[in-house]
Structure formats: C-alpha cells, structure tokens
Amino acid sequence: MTEQLPVLYLSHGAPPLADDRLWTAELAAVSAGITRPTAILIVSAHWEAAPLTLGATETVPLLYDFWGFPEHYYQVQYAAPGAPHLAEQVRKLLHSPATPVYDDPHRGLDHGAYVPLKEMYPDADIPVLQVSMPTLDPAELFRIGQKLAPLRDQGVLIVGSGFTTHNLREMNLGAPADSPAPAWSIEFDEWTKRMLEAQDVDSLIDFLHKAPAATIAHPRTEHFAPLFVTLGASEDKLRQADTVVDGFWYGLSKRSWKIG
C-alpha cells in the first residue's frame, strides 16, 4: 500500500537561493523527512493561466522567468522526468464541463518550481508536473486543492510554491539578507501562523480583510495564492501543520509548512 504523503507550501526564493546555505539545508531537510514521492505536482506563483493548464509532460527546457541576474543562474539545469500518468490523473480529477483542463506541452518548469526542487531533490529523478493557477481567488484555489487531495494516497507530493510575504518594492537589498524584518512582514507572518495553528481556513481565505498589513505584505496576491491549493489538498490534516522553514530574507517571510 502506498503511504499517504504530506502536502507542502514553500516560500521558494529567487535564483540566488542556491547560495544561501541555511535555506538550502532547510529545504534538503524537508525532503529528507518525507517518503520519496512517486511524482511531484507543483503550483507556482509564477504561472497564472486560465483555464487551468498542465505544463509539459515530457522533459523540456526550464523557463528562466527572471531578469537582471548573473549569467550562471541562467545555466542551471533541472531535467526532471515528465509525468504524463500524473497529468492524466489530474485531468480526471479536475475536468468538468464548467472547468476544462488545457495542456501547454512546451512550457518548462519556472523558477518557482525548479529553484526549490533542485535543493530538495537534486538528482532530478522524480517526475514533476506543473499546474497553472486559473485564478487568484482563494476559495476557488482551495476547491482545486480539495479535488487534488486523492493524489496524496498515490504517493504524489503536492507543493504550493509562493512566498509568505512578498513585496519587492519594500525589500532592502542593500542590507544583509538576515537584517531585521519590517513590522508589516512580521505581523502578517505571525497572523498567518496563528490562523493555520487554529485551523481557521475561513480567515485565511479572507486574508485581505482579516490579516494585518495584508496589502503591504502582498500588493498582488499571486505569491500567497498557492497556499490555498496546499490547504485544500490537506484539509483533513491541518492540525498536523508544521513550520519547516522560518525566518526572513531581505525582510520577506520565508515561512514554509509541511501538512500531514
């Protein structure tokens, strides 16, 4: 019998994450504490497409969806196997007349997917499927996660990849990465942690109205949105939510959870 896997929400970091020894060690420890997945399904903050779309089901080049970094970040490779069987399962779970599922066979993994996966599974030997976010509506993303939940019983690791706080304009890149975080980032991080500990999904879904400094922590919500897929896919195990990465990076909360 295949062991049911937990679900992850990761604050994924920019390409220089690979140079952060603490963060990379934390991500490696996360994967070391999880039974080896049969496949990985990942939802990244960096792919919004409606209707919901499945990425390449065979290995294609990575999507270097960032600008202005040193050249060596554009030479990173992560040739994970495609996951056509998982794609077919996702189609069956999600497709309906009201919610078609599209395919984009040429879209490779973006940095929200491959940057953390390269630290967690550096051999790139586990099939990976990336799925788009068809909306940023938290309730709808939560429902998508609920529909995907049965994949956990088949050894699939479901990952939402975003950032617990994400305001690039407020980052102080001239200061050390571990400088004290601003109050708005700390307050939003602590509120999110408390709500998840209380299993208060309703408040999390309504975070723009309930959370302190929500519109500063997320001027646009695409980096918080993958959390709701994670929550929906682990609805029955929220009491088992564990912080596996915490702290701040240039003032942004890198808090990440394993649930289940």
Image: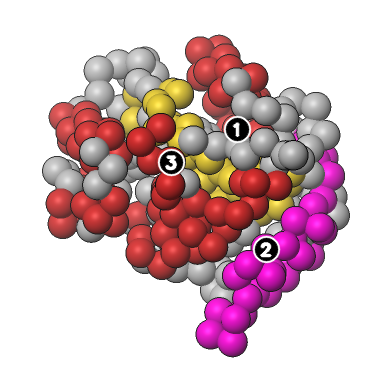
Please report contact status of discs 2 and 3: CB closer than 8 Å, yes or no. no
Residue situated in front as seen by the camera: 35 or 137? 35
Q: Residue at x 82, y 50 (%)?
A: 82
Q: Earlier in the sequence, mark 2 or mark 3?
A: 2
At numbered mark 1, what does the secondary structure look like: helix, strand or loop?
helix
At numbered mark 3, what does the secondary structure look like: helix, strand or loop?
helix
Q: Quadrant of the N terminus?
A: top right
Residue range highlighted in magenta: 77-106
The residue under label 3 is which amino acid type? Lys
Q: CA distance from mark 2 to mark 3?
A: 21 Å
Q: How crowded is the residue under tag 2: few (<14 C-alpha within 10 Å), some, or many (20+)?
A: many
Q: Is residue 157 left or right of residue 20?
A: right
The residue under label 2 is which amino acid type? Val
> In front of the other: label 1 or label 3?
3
Q: CA distance from mark 1 to mark 3?
A: 23 Å
Which residue is identified by label 2? Answer: 90
The residue under label 1 is which amino acid type? Pro
Residue 26 highlighted magenta (yes or no) = no
Q: CA distance from mark 2 to mark 1?
A: 22 Å
Q: Residue at x 15, y 51 (%)?
A: 210
Please report contact status of discs 2 and 1: CB closer than 8 Å, yes or no. no
Q: How crowded is the residue under tag 3: few (<14 C-alpha within 10 Å), some, or many (20+)?
A: some
Residue 1 disc label: none
Which residue is identified by label 3? Answer: 237
